[in-house]
Image (cartoon, helix red, strand yellow):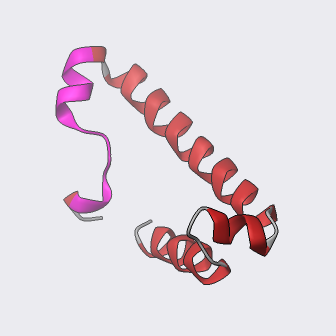
Amino acid sequence: MSDRHVTLHLTHVRRTGLGAAVFHFLLKRLRHRRDMAHLADLPDYLLEDVGLSRSDIRKHAQIRKTLR
């Protein structure tokens, strides 16, 4: 795994401790998954209102999978 894939920043680890930094990282990942699922459930006309399309959601999900 390269350094660019790790989102635990050293400044956050130093400031809060490793346990808190890992917890924060996991919480952030869970929120992201929840938000992506919520966006995927929205009808097309609402996505269009916020300037997104189904392909934008799929593209972003695909990018996240490649970064793991």
Where does the N terminus fall, quadrant-wise?
bottom left
Q: From this view, report whether residue 17 is shown above or below residue 50.
A: above
Residue 21 in percent (x, y) is at 37, 27
Majority SS type along the magenta span: helix
Residue 18 in percent (x, y) is at 33, 24
Q: From this view, report whether residue 17 is shown above or below residue 56.
A: above
At x 49%, y 28%, the residue is 23
- Residue 9 lies in quadrant: top left
Q: From this view, report whether residue 42 is shown above or below residue 24.
A: below
Q: Nearer the viewer, residue 44 or 41?
A: 44
At x 61%, y 43%, the residue is 30
Question: Total marks drawn?
Answer: 0
Q: Is residue 14 magenta?
A: yes
Where does the C terminus fall, quadrant-wise?
bottom left
Residue 17 located left or right of residue 31? left
Residue at far top of view: 16
Residue 29 in percent (x, y) is at 54, 46
- Magenta span of residues: 4-15
Q: Is residue 5 magenta?
A: yes
Residue at far bottom of view: 55
At x 60%, y 42%, the residue is 31
- Residue 54 lies in quadrant: bottom right
At x 63%, y 77%, the residue is 53
